[in-house]
Amino acid sequence: MFGLPKFGDGIGLHRVERFLQAHRVDRAALARRSIAVTGTNGKGSTARFITSAIEAAGLRVGCFTSPHLFDVRERIMIGDDIISQAEFDRHAETVLAFNRSLPEGDKLGSFEFLFMLAMLWFQQEKPDAIVWEAGIGGRYDPVRCTRASVSALTSIELEHTELLGATEELIAYDKTDAVAPGGCIILSPSINEGLAMRIAAYANLSGKATLPATASRRVGPVVNTPKGARFTYGFTAAPEAADQPVRLRLAGQHQVDNAVTGLRVAEAWLGLKPEENAERHIAMLAALGRTRWPGRLEKVASAPDLWIDVGHTPKALEAVTRTFLEFVPREKTLVVFGVSASKEVAGIADAVAARFDHFILTRAHKSGADVSLFAETFRKRSQDVTIAADTTEAARLAKDRAQREGLSVLALGGLFLSAEVQHAWNGSDPTTLDFL
């Protein structure tokens, strides 16, 4: 991305603050508009659910997410519209000029660059609300500089421990700092009660409130299908007969958790008491059902079927594979697997190897771990393991076998692997993808 490294020269909150001052960003207006989304997994989906729910109230909503699948501009949207190439290029030059003005040893990274670019576009377009997905943590993330009054905490796993802390508790504390003092943090149902209690106590020290997404709410049993998840949603104070049916285009209990978290965040930001405004509440529930988010257990090709998922932690892969097997039989699934070298290779490989029988193992061109690091994990569990030199060969082998044997192909292991396999499946060159 314009020759910038992934990370800047150390923690960059001072660089972001200087940029906001230099470009006369209205800080009060920014804080009013902003919603922060933090967590280990589910941030992007939750951000899109929040966007949809607020749009159902008739408002324009900007959304800043990461990573992207095929085009970096996917990260910066208003509603369903991504920033134009012309606007992207124009604002990019402004941010690059700012970077050139910084002293050596204090330069921007690519995430800061994109955050600043998005800030300029949103300042120009003036959406009513802006949903900001944090990059890493919350305390040192550029998103903290928006001073959002409401945030979502989607999930907690051990990640980036050298920066965020060595325990889930410390990581959670770091992420709560994405919201401004006095703000409200909506906690996903995926966060267990013991950790939620600790988060609430820590947040209270800076005047922040926490609210479990399902407090006073009832979420019915989840049914997963190839077209998404179904469940019911209502108020614990009302009879179950009044619960509303909800259909999502995304499948899995984890996506239901993201949806109900996003809905509660939208209600908090709007100041909406849905029990007093049933019509708007029902419209917001319907909006959850229209939400799309590419790469999240998504079928991207048919005859034969190709499914992809960008999950990149053991817990994420466990959730995705468990969901997939609710509607595609294990014996009819051919898994294409690879994982980034920077991830928890052993844990991710074990989560996938335990669930399936037929595998093609490969290495993404972008940051892929050597297959030798995880091949034995699969061979211990299966007699059907093929090694492909790269994602192009893996896609070709998978498509040919799936056509012959009537299998569905599932590409797993992370963003780079899944996006490259999809690109190669469609006859394109995966080495041309620019992930940052």
Image (cartoon, rainbow, N blue to C red):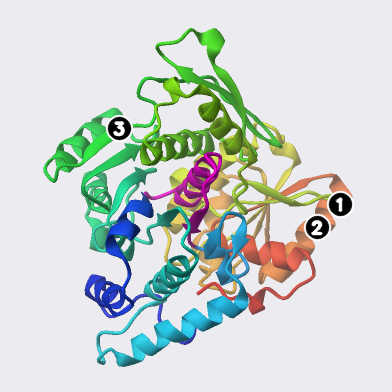
Can residue 160 be seen in the rendering of this structure? no
- Residue 62 sits above or below residue 408 on the image: below
Q: What type is the residue that disc 2 sits on? A: Lys
Q: Is residue 409 above or below residue 318?
A: below
Q: Which residues are magenta?
A: 38-66
Q: CA distance from mark 3 to mark 2?
A: 46 Å
The residue positioned farthest toward the right in the image shown: 404
Local SS, label 2? helix
- Mark in front: 3 vs 2: 3
Dot 2 crowding, Cα within 10 Å, few <14, some 14–19, many 20+:
many
Give me the C-alpha separation between circle 2 and circle 1: 6 Å
Q: Position of residue 172 (x, y in %)?
A: 26, 46
Task: Give residue 8's position: percent from left, percent from top.
Answer: 32, 78
Please check the rendered image and state whether residue 63 is part of the magenta-colored stretch, yes or no: yes
Q: Position of residue 159 (x, y in %)?
A: 33, 55
Disc 2 + disc 1, Cβ < 8 Å: yes
Disc 3 target residue: 211
Residue 167 relative to residue 420: left or right: left
Kindly identify which numbered label has been placed on residue 399.
2
Q: Position of residue 265 (x, y in %)?
A: 40, 39
SS category of the residue bearing label 3 = strand
Query: Within the magenta stretch, is there residue 406?
Result: no
Say whether marks 1 and 3 touch (CB < 8 Å): no
Which disc, if any, is residue 403?
1
Give the residue type at disc 1. Gln
| Left or right of residue 291: residue 2 | left
